[in-house]
Amino acid sequence: MEGSLNAPKCSSWSDSRLLSHPSLARAIFQRVSLAFITHPECQLHEMGEGHPERPERLAAIEDKLITSRLDYVISRHEAPLATREQLLRVHDPDYVDALAALSPKEGLVQIDPDTAMNPHTFRAALRAAGAAVLGVELVLGGKADAAFCAVRPPGHHAERARAMGFCFFNNVAVAAAHALDRLGLTRVAVVDFDVHHGNGTEDAFRNDSRVLMVSTFQHPFYPGSGVEGRSERMVNVPLEAGAGSREFRAAVEQDWLPALHRFQPQLILFSAGFDAHRDDGMAFLRFQESDYSWVTAQVRDVALRYASGRIVSLLEGGYDLDVLGRCVAAHLGELVAW
Ligand SMILES: [Zn+2]
């Protein structure tokens, strides 16, 4: 594990440019600790030339951390490999074994039309799930107030026994299961604002009364799920192509927040995909950067009320590099802005 848990990386407490940003100034003086978890192996996974889920996504986030000066208030941690025990809480053993066996020595192995493995993919996927576990450990152990996992491959489409949609292991589900089964929580909420429905997460927790999932996604759109089986704990809000800030914020205010307040989560996990942004070419929703700040603040207030502020956020989609960097910075800026 790398990084200092407590000390913000600020060379000077009176850095006037830094303190001119109110969120960052508050974070430093109140010593809100945001763990930033990633691993170099997450950049070695590639799915072919021109694929939108590309290593440069993580570099774009790193660049923006520096230019937004968020780098000063994060503590960096290297993602461990998820253990077999951690994966088997949400995946079938035969599936994990089959994925390991498919891992190529060279070249690509196509898993579905959009999803492929190169020689580094399996370990990158283990790092991504391991980051999620570490985030939960740090936050529930009181070593960080919040955590962000800058990882790839993403996870929310991965089902119990199926890789799909660029995803292999369901990172957010592994995190939730770790908090519930290992660390003794009884109520964990998953907040998913990716433009695609998190079918894998729903698959993992559809029948688990300890998990609330709230989500928005474009519909009809890939993967086509999420519109049936809505319940008190599966609060899916499909949005039509062209929907933007107004529709998103209405969904959060009218559907997500009442459900979160009823549920009173002890920990909140974000499936943080930024592909619903108006300038992301993956889909046709029209969210703006300010929507990601706003929703993060709304959810953070719920976390402060019921969960001692404990939030772990995991990167999902987001394919325009500039938009991705800016939106992650907006999201993280609110995570440290208590
Ligand atoms: Zn997505």
Image (spheres, rainbow, N blue to C red):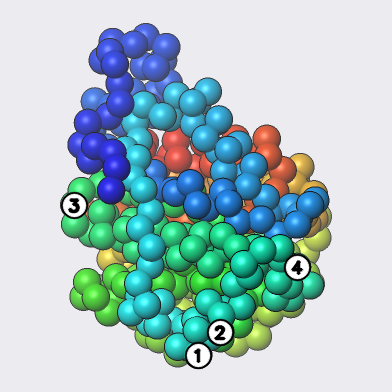
| Residue 114 badge | 4
Amino acid marked by disc 4? Asp
| Callout 2 crowding tier (Cα within 10 Å): few <14, some 14–19, many ≥20 | few
Return the residue at label 1: 94
Q: Amino acid at mark 2?
A: Ala
Mark 1 or 3 closer to N-term? 1
How far apart are labels 2 and 3 at the CA level? 37 Å
In the image, which disc is placed on residue 98?
2
The residue at 79%/52% (across/down) is 49
Q: Which secondary structure, mark 2? A: helix
- Distance Cα–Cα, label 2 vs label 4: 18 Å
Lower sequence index among marks 4 and 1 = 1
In this rendered view, identify the residue nearer to me: 119 or 300.
Answer: 119
Q: Is residue 209 above or below residue 15?
A: below
Using the rendered view, name the quadrant where residue 7 is placed: top left
* The disc label shown at residue 265, or none: none
Residues 134 and 288: in front is 134
| Alpha-carbon span between mark 3 and mark 4 | 39 Å
Q: Residues at badges 3 and 4 in contact (C-beta under 8 Å)?
A: no
